[in-house]
Amino acid sequence: MGDVPVPQDEEQIDERARLKSAILSHTIRHLEPATPVWVKTESTVAEAVTAMVEGGMGSVLVGDPTALEGIFTERDVMKRVVHAGLDAKTTRVGDVMTADPDVLTADDRVGYTLKKMVLRKYRHIPVVDKQGRVVGVISARSVAKFIVSIFPEATLNLPPGDELKNPNQMDSG
């Protein structure tokens, strides 16, 4: 990643200050954590993938809301299952999940969330309440949506040229 260009005009400086303020002051409550999809450690990878697809999520949590045992993501499918040559129909999620994952609380700031996602290469992080019960999942997509909400005109009214190729189909990006 290269350096971020330094804003040149007053409008760019104002937008940059607005973004910085939002990231440093808003908690992840503003990101609207998604309802998690759950599987058990005994579930197969194939069952977990089905749960992800049906739940519209890129991850599943393993265990239950009062006892988070792990997280299993689409990246885990790629690296720990497919690349390793394992059979998704017989491999247990408990054998390939990330056990005891890092978590966030609803009071954590968006900036802290971004830092954790970037430095640890996370795309999904469970959110827990004060008693440690899982109440949601924050994804990189929810952070991107938050940033877009700060600048809806600038991001949603981009000039032609970078339009979706097939807007009615799921893309792979």
Image (cartoon, rainbow, N blue to C red):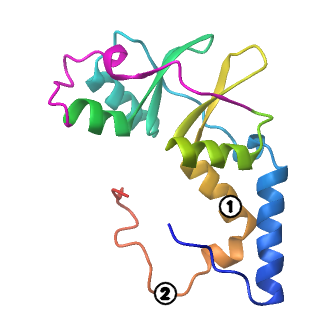
Q: Distance from label 1 to label 2 (Cα)?
A: 21 Å
User: Measured along the vertical axis of the image, is residue 50 above or below residue 5?
Assistant: above
Q: Position of residue 91 (x, y in %)?
A: 23, 18
Res 122 visible: no
**Residue at the spot 19% in from the left edge and 31% down from the top edge:** 84
- The residue under label 2 is 160
Residue 77 is inside the magenta segment? no
Check disc 2 and give the amino acid type. Pro
Count of residue discs = 2
Q: Quadrant of residue 52?
A: top left
User: Measured along the vertical axis of the image, is residue 116 above or below residue 145?
Assistant: above
Mark 1 or mark 2: which comes first in sequence?
A: 1
The magenta region covers 83-105
Residue 103 is inside the magenta segment? yes
**Residue at the spot 28% in from the left edge and 37% down from the top edge:** 79
Q: Position of residue 66 (x, y in %)?
A: 63, 10
**Residue at the spot 55% in from the left edge and 51% down from the top edge:** 141
Task: Identify the residue at the far front of this view.
Answer: 3
Q: Nearer the viewer, mark 1 or mark 2?
A: 1
Check disc 1 and give the amino acid type. Ile
Q: Secondary structure at mark 2?
A: loop
Label 2 crowd bin: few (<14), some (14–19), many (20+), radius 10 Å: few
- The residue under label 1 is 147
Q: Position of residue 170 (x, y in %)?
A: 36, 56
Q: Position of residue 45 (x, y in %)?
A: 29, 23
Q: Answer with left or right where residue 137 lies relative to residue 109.
A: left
**Residue at the spot 81% in from the left edge and 85% down from the top edge:** 11
Res 167 visible: yes
Magenta segment, principal secondary structure? loop
Task: Identify the residue at the far bottom of this view.
Answer: 9
Q: Secondary structure at mark 1?
A: helix
Of residues 1 and 117, the one drawn nearer to the viewer in this rendering: 1
